[in-house]
Image: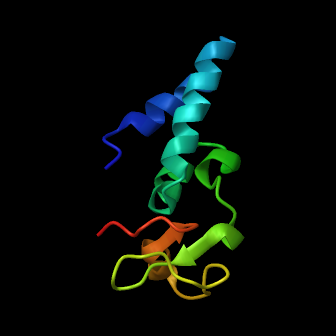
Amino acid sequence: MLEGGVPILTACLKVANPQTYENASGALWNVGLDVRNGLALAAAGAPDFLATPVPPTWLTRGTSAGAGGGGGGLDAGGPGDVQDAVFMTQQLQL
């Protein structure tokens, strides 16, 4: 899934060049939009605002048909519940 690029991008955040910082943070932001990548980003040392850029209130639950759920936020539950959380109305990719 992430193929080892996250630690490299996280290291690029420490480079003094502003363009490098901007590009690395943009890439990490994009990776963080998939809620399944949040743990990998946090483990690699990415700042919290990049590891979880989507507020929990913006997440919905996927349905068995793959469409975004109609709920108003992520239901509370166990650690496995994050696996089918999707951002807004994106379709769940299985």
Question: Which residue corresponds to the image point at 61% horizontal and 32% vertical from the top-left?
Answer: 25
Hey, which quadrant is residue 15 in on the image? top right
Q: Taking the image as drawn, is residue 14 in sight?
A: no
Q: Position of residue 64 (x, y in %)?
A: 34, 85
Numbered circles on residues, count: 0
Q: Is residue 14 above or below residue 61?
A: above
Question: Which residue corresponds to the image point at 46% horizontal and 53% vertical from the top-left?
Answer: 40
Colouring used for the render: rainbow
Q: Nearer the viewer, residue 3 or 70?
A: 70
Q: On the picture, is 77 further left or further right than 3?
A: right
Q: On the picture, is 83 further left or further right than 24?
A: left
Q: Is residue 32 above or below residue 79?
A: above
Q: Position of residue 54 (x, y in %)?
A: 64, 58
Q: Position of residue 33 (x, y in %)?
A: 54, 53
Q: Position of residue 62 (x, y in %)?
A: 45, 79
Q: Taking the image as drawn, is residue 29 in sight?
A: yes
Q: On the picture, is 1 further left or further right than 38?
A: left
Q: Is residue 68 above or below residue 64?
A: above
Q: Is residue 47 above or below residue 55?
A: above
* Quadrant occupied by the C terminus: bottom left
Hey, which quadrant is residue 83 in on the image? bottom left
Question: Which residue corresponds to the image point at 58% horizontal and 42% vertical from the top-left?
Answer: 29
Q: Nearer the viewer, residue 61 or 51?
A: 61
Question: Which residue corresponds to the image point at 57% horizontal and 24% vertical from the top-left?
Answer: 23
Hey, which quadrant is residue 59 in on the image? bottom right
